[in-house]
Amino acid sequence: MEPTAHERHEQGEPPHGPSAAEPSAAGPYAPGGPGEADGGGEAEKADGAEEADGADGAAGAEEADGTSGRWAPPAQALLARAAAELAPAPHANPFVPLVADGTADRGAVAALALEQCRIIPADRRSFLHLAASSADAGLPAGAAFFGALAEGETLASDRLGALLAACQVGERQAEEYVPTAGCQAYPAYVAWLALNGEPADVVLALTANFAAWGGYCATLARALRARYGFPDEACAFFDLFAEPSPDLGRSALAALEEGVSRGTLTPRTALRQGRLLQEYEGMFWSSLADRAGAARA
C-alpha cells in the first residue's frame, strides 16, 4: 500500500516512530502549521480558487524548511509543509498497539495480510496507470516515480505468502475472505486519483502520507517476532517497508520539481488529496482494530 524499502530511502522517514502509536514525521517532512481537512471533490481545481496555488509552489522556493530556518528548494518546502499538515495525531492508529503488546490475536494479523492481498494489486495497477499518464504528458520524472511505486508493490506481494502461512491462512480461506469496506477505501481512492488526479499533485499527496507507514511497519515487524514468534520470512513484508530506501526520495523530489517547473502542481489540491488519503488510511487501521476487538469479545 505504501512505499517499500526498495523505494523509500531518503524520504526522511525514520525506520520507526517514538512509539507504536506515534510515528515520527522527521527528515524532509519538517514540522509546521496544521492543515485543514477538506472532503470536497478534487475536480474543484478549475474553479479558480486554487489557480493561484501554482504560485504557492514557487513561493516555497524562498521558504525555510520549517525546522532549521535554512532555505529549501520548492519541492523540499512543499514536502515539509505537506508532512506537517498531514502528520497523524498521537495515538491515531488503534491497531498497531494491539499487536505491539500482543493482545491482538493471530486472526487479526491474518486479516491485515488478507486485506493487503487485495490492496497491493489494486495500488500497483493505479501506479502503473499514473506512470503511463505521466509519460504521455511528457513528465519523465513523474513516470519514474510511479513506476518505482509499482515495482515496490510487486516486491511486497511476493512477501505476503510467508505472512499468510505464519497466520495459518490456507488457500481456501484466502479465496473466501470477504474484505472490509474500511480497509479497501484507501486503494479505492488511490484508483480515483489515478483516473482523475494531476500526476504531480498525486506525487505530493502520496509522499506526505508515506511518512507514518514505515514506523508502523517497523513496530509490527518487531512485535510479530517478539510477541508472536513469527520467523523472519513471515516478517519480510513489514521489513520491506520499514527500512529506508535511497532512490524514492530523490525520485519524489524530482517529480515535484518537474511539476513546479511545468506549472502542473497545485499544492492546495495535493494537500486536500493527501488529507483524504490520511483519513482513508485511518479507516484501514480502525477497521482492523474493530475486527480485533470483536474477536476478543
Image (cartoon, rainbow, N blue to C red):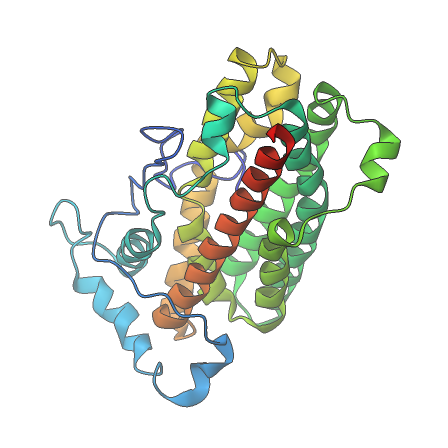
In the image, is residue 256 above or below residue 2?
Answer: below
Q: Could you tell me which residue is drawn at 46 percent across and 82 percent down? A: 44
Report if residue 207 is visible in the image: yes
Give the position of the N terminus as an image quadrant.
Answer: top right
Question: Residue 93 appears in which quarter of the rendering?
Answer: top left
Question: Residue 278 appears in which quarter of the rendering?
Answer: bottom left
Front residue of 247/26: it is: 26
Image x and y of residue 272, in percent: 41, 67
Front residue of 249/98: it is: 98
Q: Residue furthest front?
A: 297
In the image, is residue 133 above or below residue 73?
Answer: below
Give the position of the C terminus as an image quadrant.
Answer: top right
Report if residue 218 is visible in the image: no
Q: Could you tell me which residue is drawn at 31 percent across and 29 percent down? A: 18
Judged left or right of residue 69, residue 293 is right
Q: Residue furthest bottom?
A: 47
Image x and y of residue 223, in percent: 50, 19
Image x and y of residue 27, in percent: 29, 40
Question: Residue 35 appears in which quarter of the rendering?
Answer: bottom left
Q: Residue furthest right?
A: 172
Q: Could you tell me which residue is drawn at 30 percent across and 47 percent down? A: 29
Image x and y of residue 249, in percent: 41, 44
Judged left or right of residue 139, residue 183 is right
Judged left or right of residue 246, residue 76 is left
Number of dots carrying numbers: 0
